[in-house]
Amino acid sequence: VEIPQTRDKPIQVLSTDELGRLRMAADGMSGWRGVVARFLVPFCPGTGLRPKEIRLEEFACVHPDEGFLLVCRPKGEGRYASPHTQQAPVGDDAAQAYRDFLPERDAFLGGETHPALLPYRHEDGALDYWPEACLRKLKADPEQAYGDKFKIRAFPATMGQVAIDNRA
């Protein structure tokens, strides 16, 4: 049995103003990295996905019109969680971000297919899932323009705080 440990550090939650500043910073980014950043800023707090979960999420498992997605690679996979069995909500902002992202994703793939929600193209042209190191580097660009450090894992906590604030 795993017993949760208390946290010494406070949980970081992003305010509406902070999310707005992140969106403005992502709007200033160009290329595919900018497209992904503009998608992630509203999508992650609207779904509560963790960094690993968003990187390895599959396109076919996102159902924004039904208001949910299946988590493809959940935390605890292989120990206490199974792939494609847990649902996460898809809020209105996340659903709109998804719809806005689809044409950009199709253009990036250029007629090719790949199961990843966030496909990544290597220098040799091969498609893959978004690498962990590239996600950290992607975070650095809006972080510099935003003017403050934040953690991608603040997005799930932000979703939870918004739900509490809205009396969920």
Image (cartoon, helix red, strand yellow):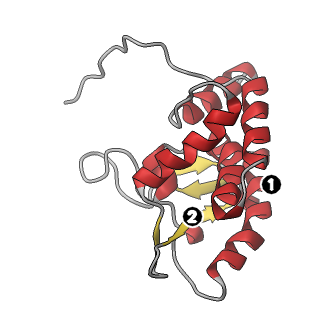
Residues 146 and 90: in front is 146
| Label number found at residue 118 | 2
Residues 133 and 59: in front is 133
In the rendered image, residue 95, in percent from the top left (x then y), is placed at 75, 54
Q: In terms of secondary structure, where does tag 2 sit? A: loop
Of labels 1 and 2, earlier in sequence is 1
The residue under label 1 is 96
Three-letter code, disc 1: Gln
> At 65% from the left edge and 40% from the top edge, which residue is drawn?
142
Please identify the quarter of the rendering in which residue 109 is found: bottom right
- 34 lies above or below 157: below
For residue 116, say whether it is visible: yes
For residue 48, say whether it is visible: no
Which quadrant is the N terminus positioned in? top left
Residues 48 and 20: in front is 20
Judged from this view, the residue extending furthest toward the left is 1
Please identify the quarter of the rendering in which residue 68 is found: bottom right
Q: Rate crowding at label 1 as few (under 14), some (14 to 19) or many (20 or more) other CA atoms within 10 Å.
A: some
> At 76% from the left edge and 54% from the top edge, which residue is drawn?
97
Three-letter code, disc 2: Leu
Which quadrant is the C terminus positioned in? top right
